Each structure stands twice: as C-alpha cells, then as structure tokens.
Amino acid sequence: MKKLIICLTVCLSILSWRPARAQGINFQTITMQEAMNIAGNPANPKLILMDCYTTWCIPCVEMASYEFPKKIAGDYFNPKFVSVKFDMEKGEGKELAKKYNVKAYPTFLILNAQGQEINRVVGKSTAQEFIEKVKVALDPKNTLPGLKTAYDADKQMRTGLPYALALYQNSKDPTPVLDELFENAQDFERFSKDYLELALGTTKFGSPFFKKLMMEKGSIDQALGTEVTNQILFDKVRKDMYGIATETGAKYNVFYTPQEVEDVAYIIGLLKLPQNDAQNHMCRIALFVVNKDLDGMTRYFNRHIANLPTTSPYKGILEGILMTNAAKASPEQKAAIKAYFENKNKSLIKEAKSYQEKIDRTK
C-alpha cells in the first residue's frame, strides 16, 4: 500500500510538472536552416530567437531552468518566434558562434527568417525583464545601425553611451566612442557611474585609452570609491592571469607577452590590494610562470603565501600552481619546493596538536 501511494505521488508530480514546462518558451531541437524554413512560412511568418549558451555558464542554466519555463515567457515568445538554442562550443553552435561573433554568455540573438541579425540581448534577466529587453531590441531605433545614426547626428553622452554599450554587446570595440565621449563630455558626465563602469569594464587593460583613464584615477576613485575602482580593475585581469599562471590560457584564446604580464602585475601592485587575500597574488604568480622563474616563485611563496589563512580556497589554487611547476624543476628547485610544503606540514601538525590539547582539557 505504501509503495502504491508513493507511485501515485510521483506520477501526479510528473503530470503536474509537464504542463508547467509546456507553458514556457518552446525551444525546438532543430538546425538553424530548419528554424529559418519555419520562420519563413508565408502563412505564419515569425522571427527567430536563438539562445546562445555554454554548459559552464551559470546564468544560462538559471534562465533555462527558472525563467524560460514561465507562462509569461511562453505567452510572449511562442506566437512570434521560432525559438532554438545552441551550445556555442559544440556541433553547429561552434559555427554559429563564429558567424554571429558571440563571445559573451548568455547571448540571445533576434534574427529574421533569412538568419540576419536584427539585434541581441546579453545577460541574465527574469522572464519579465527579458521580454521587456526584447521589445526594446525590436525597436529599429535601438538596433546597432539605429544607435549609430542617433550618435552621428548628435554626439552627446545620452546617445553615445547606449551606442557604446551596444557595440560591446555585439562583440565590437566601443573604445573609439568612449574615448570621444571622454574627450568632449563634461566632467559630471564622464565621471558618472554609468560611463565609468562601461569604460573601465570594456577597455583593454594597458591600451592607450586605459592609460588615459588611469591618469584620472584620482577623480575616478572619488566618483566610484577607491575599493570599487580597484576591484573593477582587478576583475578585468583576474581570469586572464589565472590562465597564464596555470598555463591554460591558449585554450581560451588568452595570450600575453611577458612584458604585458609585467605591466599588469605592476599596475595591480599599485592598487595596494589586501595581501591577506590569496587571489590578489595571482598576477605576481603569473609573472613568475611566464618568465619561467621557479626560484623567484618559491621565494615568493615562502615570503608571502606560506602564512596566508589555510581556509582561503585561492591559497590551495596557488599552491597547486607551485606543485605543477615542480614537475619541470631541477633537483635543487624540487628540494626548495619540498621544503616549503614540509614547513607547512610541520606548522599544521603543530596547530592540530594545539587544538587537540584544547579538546583534551575540555573533557
């Protein structure tokens, strides 16, 4: 009887779950050509919504799991769009990523029946927010050509900032527009939060425009706060420096010369980030790796990394980098690396013994 009740409960759950899912966006498992054929049906013409995702993109998964199944999403998209989704790192998705120059995730392409891009929406949203963004994107004046026309006609911050953002979201360089605005706008505009976050977030680290911004860092710090500014700057290179330090950068098209890594490490060093946070040492470690300076790295670990809190997950990542480099070390270098870990082991044993004594005294 108990098993029967459980079975009925599971069946009812499945039955109640399926309609809820069906109410959401109907993503069809078809090729891009098939989507274009369906959208081009003269009897029922539609646009195409393409969800460009990757398996490692958490916001992509969250939108697919929680937002797209909502009825409000299905009610808006299903009558107007042929909806498809492609993993940009597999199968047809790899070619589509190149064709449409998709580099940020999640990206949602709005295409006509010929597969031509009308506009795109980038980033995570709720179902309602996503609908509103798509409605805005469908307005011709909000397309990339429309925004360019508006900016060319009146080069002001109110026209330039939306155009620069659209360029960035379309994987195009917004720097010329942002640079022009920085030169010509009034201070209250160019040191506004919206402008600075876009300019700092999109400009290439070490580029001429980046250096121009850094010469005004005092004013930027006043506008955003020093800690916020420093965090934005560090976040720009955190992932790249991790790729350099772990020698996995090429896998993600991350390439820096040793001089470029040194420039990054120098500028990040000037920010005076808290040294008790292990992640803030990543740029220096990357510099040791790119210069193949294992002796310098080991000394740096003994001086700066050894006493960092063991609870920091980044400390384990940094020590993993040291261990990886031990495989190609000379006998003397291996001995120095081994000594580092032996000293850490002794320290932890001593700490564990201290805690054990405290435990014994509380019996």
Image: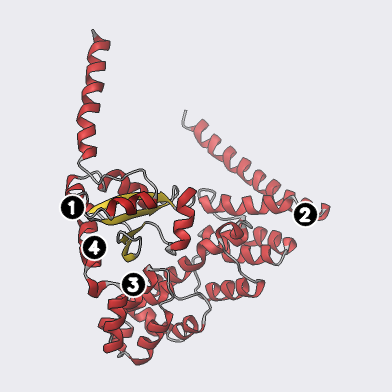
Q: Which mark is residue 133?
A: 4
Query: Which residue position holds label 2?
Result: 329
> Percent position (x, y) of residue 342?
70, 46
Label 2's element? loop
Q: Is residue 234 visible?
A: yes
Residue 192 lies, with reference to residue 64, above or below; the image says below
> Residue drawn at (64%, 67%), measured in percent from left and top?
287
Image quarter of residue 136? bottom left
> Percent position (x, y) of residue 222?
35, 81
- Kindly report the distance in space between the C-alpha atoms of the residues bearing marks 2 and 4: 54 Å
Query: Which residue position holds label 3?
Result: 166
> Residue drawn at (40%, 71%), measured in percent from left and top?
227
| Quadrant holding the N terminus | top left
Image quarter of residue 2? top left
Marks 4 and 3, the one that precedes in the sequence: 4
Q: Which mark is residue 76?
A: 1
Marks 3 and 2, the one that precedes in the sequence: 3
Question: Looking at the image, which residue sits at the far top?
Answer: 1
> Percent position (x, y) of residue 160?
31, 82
- Kindly report the distance in space between the C-alpha atoms of the residues bearing marks 3 and 1: 24 Å
Q: Nearer the viewer, residue 53 or 361?
A: 53
Give the total of numbered labels.
Answer: 4
Q: Which mark is residue 159?
A: none
Query: Do residues under tags 1 and 2 come within 8 Å of each other at their CB atoms?
Result: no
Instruction: Residue type at mark 4: give it.
Output: Lys
Marks 1 and 2, the one that precedes in the sequence: 1
Between circles 3 and 2, the one closer to the viewer is 3
Between circles 3 and 1, the one closer to the viewer is 1
